[in-house]
Amino acid sequence: MIQKKMCILGAFAVGKTSLVRRFVSTIFDEKYLTTVGVKIDKKTISVDGQELMLLLWDIEGQDVYHTVQTSYLRGASGYFLVADGTRGDTIAAAIDLKNRMEEQAGRIPHLLLINKSDLKESWEVEQEDLNVLSESGMEIRITSAKTGEEVEEAFFTLAGKMLR
């Protein structure tokens, strides 16, 4: 069995922990859980007939006052950048994290997840913003940890890219 490290990065309260819990345990909890440092979960999946153990590194949120420990990023085979569709500024934090990740690990597989699609009526992120990011080469998925929309698909897509 192959083992791969996958990091989940983003600003505070974008839904990183909720996405991991939805994928690993198929549950969602309304109460906000602050991650301190890093929380590591495991899940074994099958991708293209290959058994793969994912080590999911849910890394605490980042903002202008608090930056991610670069030691958490070492050894990653892929990563998610998570932004909150209801908070447009979280996209800038995700782009900043992408740059930091590339400095630390080089160019490795990643996806940008715009989370909280269940709150679309409250979104600050516009389709034009997503188009610009997409045209710059960013692969984007619209997810909801609450409903499970596109969560499993995103993890399997990134896992497949990590195996190639």
Image (cartoon, rainbow, N blue to C red):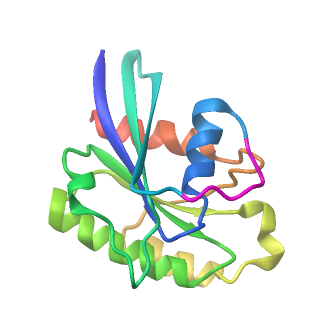
Give the side of residue 129 with respect to residue 41, left or right.
right
Between 76 and 12, the residue placed more toward the observer is: 12
In the image, residue 5 lies in the stretch drawn in magenta: no
> Quarter of the image containing the C terminus?
top left
* Residue 146 x %, y %: 75, 51
Residue at the far front in the pictured view: 36
Instruction: Name the residue located 50 percent from the left edge and 41 percent from the top edge.
Output: 155
Looking at the image, is 27 positioned above or below residue 107?
above
* Residue 36 x %, y %: 45, 57
Q: Magenta region: which residues?
A: 28-34
Looking at the image, is 148 positioned above or below residue 11?
above
Give the side of residue 82 with respect to residue 100, left or right.
right
Corner quadrant of residue 42? top left
Corner quadrant of residue 162? top left
Q: Is residue 106 visible?
A: no
Q: Is residue 80 visible?
A: yes
Give the side of residue 69 with respect to residue 27, left or right.
left
Tally the numbered discs.
0
> Quarter of the image containing the N terminus?
top left
* Residue 160 x %, y %: 39, 35
